[in-house]
Image (cartoon, rainbow, N blue to C red):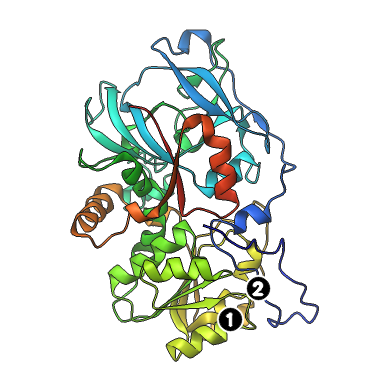
Amino acid sequence: MPETAPPDAAPPDPAGSHAARPYVGSAETALDHALPDTANVDAAPVAAIPASAANKSGTVTAAVCRAFGGPLTLETLRLRAPRGTEVEVTLGAVAICHSDIAFARGAWGGPLPAVYGHEAAGTVTAAGPQAKFGPGESVIVTLIRACGQCAACASGAPVACADPQGPADGPLTTPEGGAVYQAMACGAFAERVVVDGGQLARIPPELAMETACLLSCGVITGIGAVVNSAGLRAGQDVVVIGAGGVGLNAIQGARIAGARRIVAVDLTQAKLDDAAAFGATDGVLADVPAPWQAAMAIMGRGADVVICTVGSAAAYRDVPLYLSARGKVVMVGMPPAGAMAEIEPMALAYSGHRLIGSRMGDTVLARDIPWLVDLYRQGRLKLDELVSRRWRLDQINEAIADTAAGHARRNVIVFDR
């Protein structure tokens, strides 16, 4: 769908007030415009893996990043067999997320060469001796790798696990035995992956892979931000800033949770129309003067919760202005590393406002995935409607460009089975 590109930066505000229009766009466009084409971040080398530890079980075609900001290249890599609790999954589909684009552009650094991709679904084809999954099971693959032993895991917060990446000797190598970084512990821009079993959740076999893969990131991040991170109660008012893929899921999460008013804020009318289809009761264009005032006029007061899905630090500057007293800002959008946003501590303290970081929607896979699948079966959760277009793995650079341009709710790579 067409979209007008947002400006490259927030307009100047020499008075230091909130009079200037904030930089607010969809989650699918803001991060792209916040990054240069090639970020000036040095890639850390991947530690060498001894030849004796290299995979001897098979090869896999993967889209590999060898230079930040450059195109991904299809290469044949070696994928070792699963060990311990690890599981091999042959993928049916993987969605393009803006986090993958940010990593590939160097926004958050990391080792190279690397394979990105983390929003996937497939079928188990092999398992380690201690794995709790068996061949033939349909699963989603997520980046939520939980050790089950640290303080965060023990307290029911697996997204904050102290060991999210896992062993240094990942499962991917070049044909010569050189290490390839399995980004976000997934590396799902590939035909198959070997991941820890804790990163998987079972799904019904009849659920289409291109639909199921969306549960791995965009859906749980948006809905979880509302239900888990914000703890939204029925009858409360919500503002969702950014109506891209994650924002649309935050909107339908608010609808499912029983919000009174759900106000979407975005730069384009097309995105606001999408928001209405997913449950927004109202929409505000972000380029009107003081859009928070327009949102308050609709609600009759400030919002109880503001979900910011925009990957721009400038967008966070004005988010508290949408709030009622004791309201919550849930910070979902992730700007590039080092980007700063100013707040006024006195106003924050006096109003009792709360800033809450939300990673992967504070999801607990065993609890949340069965619930979401059931909602989908009931027709209360939109998944199929999120897929904008299907692509092959050899079209991944085109799919990334389309996503970065803000044309898609979600682009999905579909593998031949």
List the single residue furthest toward the front: 2
Q: Amino acid at mark 2?
A: Pro
In percent of width and height, residue 351 lies at: 52, 85
> Would you identify the image quadrant in which residue 266 lies?
bottom right
Q: Residues within 10 Å of mark 1 (few under 14, many from 20)?
A: many
Q: Is residue 130 above or below residue 352?
A: above
Residue on which the image places disc 2: 22
The residue under label 1 is: 291
Mark closest to the chain's N terminus, 2 or 1: 2
Counting from the top left corner in percent of width and height, residue 64 is at 57, 28
| Picture layout, residue 313 above or below residue 413 | below
Answer above or below: position of 88 versus 388.
above
Residue at x 39%, y 54% (from the top left corner): 386
Residue 343: mark: none
**In the image: residue 382, left or right of residue 318:** left
Q: At numbered mark 2, what does the secondary structure look like: helix, strand or loop?
A: loop
